[in-house]
Structures are given as structure tokens and as C-alpha cells.
Amino acid sequence: MRRLIHLVGLIAALSTAATTGAARADTLRIATWDAALSRRGPGLLLQDIRRGKDPQIAAAVAVIAATRPDVLLITDIDYDATGLALTALRERLAAAGAPYPHAFARAPNTGVPTGLDLDGDGVATGPRDAQGYGWFPGQGGMAILSRLPIDAGSSRDLSALLWRDLPGNLIAGAGLGAETQAVQRLSSSGHWDVVVITPSGPLHLLAYAATPPVFDGPNDRNGRRNRDETALWLAYLDGRLPWPAPTGRFVILGDANLDPADGEGRRDALAALLADPRVQDPKPTSKGAVAAASTGHRGDPALTTADWDEGKGPGNLRVDYLLPSAGLRVTAAGVYWPPPGDPGADAASGASPHRLVWADIALP
């Protein structure tokens, strides 16, 4: 099995270098990916990475080595305060020919206790009682890997913003009492403004991962929160948050957990963001998404980024986004989703239901 996984990763890397091309010296390849690198207990991800026997981790390494982003946001990756799991992953990637000397991670809201019984089941210590769904603090967080230096001192973590403090929020109809509203943060995982130092100056990565707009009750709490997690970026760009608006070039990226046309959710904030003249949507596509198109959907199947069972789930949706600021020049963009039978297809499907989304940005 290990030899097979190694061969899959090697073939995928060679195939992608030949067909899509790694980012040239005058371009910067930025990517976002929900890599499903979360486990049910603390320390289990580190254990699985170090043992080297987990086929899902091997597939994830193969996908990253194949696409070779210069800067990569990973969502749904377990966080530990010492960074051991992230360091172990970087070691695996370096061994696969994809070194990332720089990394950024902060404690997410997932699994952080609120001390309140938010789901009304009589206990206040369950995964749905945390600031963001999680069985333990740090489960399913975020991390940024970069070949370029990261200016951590100039970066911002917006994740402590209370939901009720977002201008125009929808918390009022979510069925939350005053005590809950006083502690409930907006970010289910995190919202970051991370500054990467490129050869032509700083670039802000506005990174996030939103809660799914499902798995709730008649008050649509998750649907409202999902909507507001994307609306935060509009407020941030407007300068309507406690932090000043970012200046210069930026890229909004991450897992919005919302499709513009299909599946459940409140789409007004996402539609406003996609139409905002301050950003551009390169609309990355893939042949694999077309081959796996869901029936009855209204959106363009080529744009979908997640492969979910049509019978048991919502079908394939576009939920992962990479939106550069309007002044940046995008030279290429895509979703790493090879069609069945192509090199790399097994690694892509074996790593995560989501597919890696990338864009090449010209450096002036």
C-alpha cells in the first residue's frame, strides 16, 4: 500500500507539472484546500503523520506536491499549541519535494468551551457547546504554509469578534439568549489577515473557514452564522470593524461552505462579495468536476469544488473560493480535480471530499 501511494503521488506530481505547470518565477501560485486533516482526538493527527501508514495523509501530501502552491491555506487541520502536527506535515511535504519553510497557525474557535449548554441537551461540554463545533480545542482549525516569508507581527487574528458585534448581523433571529450572545464568537473556526512578503511587497491573505449552513433547527442558527462569516469580509474591507481596513493587495480565500446557486444556505452576503468591484472571481474549473456533475443543479458544474454524495448529501457544490483583489493580474486558475482514470485522480479523491483550488498571480 505504501509503495502504491508513493507511486500515485509521484505520477500526480509529474502529470501536474506537465499539464498545469508549477508557478513560474514571475508568478505566485496561491491555493486553498479543505484537506480533511482532522481527527477525533488531540494528538491523533500527529500520530498518523509520523507513523506514515495513513493513506489519506499520503494522498494529501501527493495532492500538495502535485500542485506545488507557493502559498497554501489548509482548512480542517487540527491545531496544537506546540505546532508539532504542522511541523510533521511540513517534513512529509519536504520529503515529497514540496518544502514550506514558513508557516502560520493560530488557535481556532473550534472546540473552545463556552461554559454554556448551547444545544440544549442538558450538558455544557459537548462539541456543539463550543465556540465552533469540535470535540476538543483545535480540532479542524486552519494553517498557512508558504515558501515566502510571513510577517506575523503585521498579521491580524479577527476570530475573537463576537457575532453580535458584526454590523448587520443576523444573530437576532438565531434563537440565542442574551447570555449566549454575550459570549458567542462569529468565527466558527477563524478569520485571519495574514501578511505574506512577496518580491514585490506585502500581500494580505484574508483566510477563513465557515460553518456549514445545516445541522441546526428551525431558527437556522448555522445558516445565519454561515452567512455572517462571509459578510465579515465586506465589513472588514469597508473599515466597519474594530480593525482598520487592509491596505494594498489582498486575496480572500477559504471554505465558505456555501454554493452561489445550489444546496442550502443564505446567499446574499456571498453574492455581494462575488460582485464587489474590489475583488475578482477567476472562476477556477476542472474536468473532474464536469465528469462528476450532479443532476438537477443550477450552477455551472465545472466550478464545483467538493464531491459529496448526491443521494445522501447535497451533491457536488462550489464551496471553496480564492478571490484576488481587483488590482492583481491572474494568469491562470483551476481546481485540482483530475477526471477518473487520469493520473492524480485517486489521490485527489482519497484525500478529501474537497478539491484544492489554485490561482497564479503575476508579480509586478
Image (cartoon, rainbow, N blue to C red):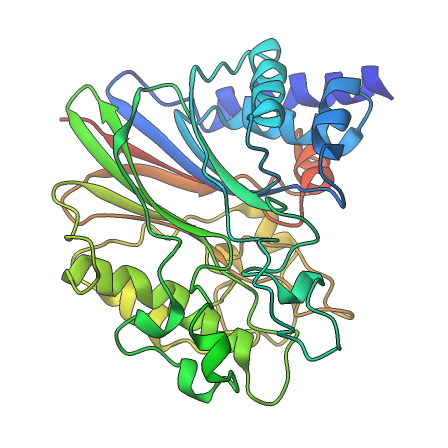
Apparent side of residue 14 relative to residue 350 in the rendered image (left or right): left
Apparent side of residue 363 relative to residue 25 in the rendered image (left or right): left
Q: Is residue 267 visible?
A: yes
Residue 120 image offset from top left, x and y in percent: 69, 80
Q: Is residue 74 visible?
A: no
Q: Image quadrant of residue 340? A: top right
Residue 4 image offset from top left, x and y in percent: 82, 20
Q: Work out whether residue 226 or residue 280 is closer to the camera in this orientation and state it.
A: 226
Q: Residue at x 71, y 38 (%)?
A: 42
For residue 222, above or below residue 203: below
For residue 185, above or below residue 208: below
The image quadrant where one finds the C terminus is top left
For residue 232, above or below residue 59: below
Apparent side of residue 7 relative to residue 207 in the rendered image (left or right): right
Q: Image quadrant of residue 227? A: bottom left
Residue 34 image offset from top left, x and y in percent: 56, 45
Residue 22 image offset from top left, x and y in percent: 42, 22
Q: Residue at x 75, y 77 (%)?
A: 122
The image quadrant where one finds the N terminus is top right
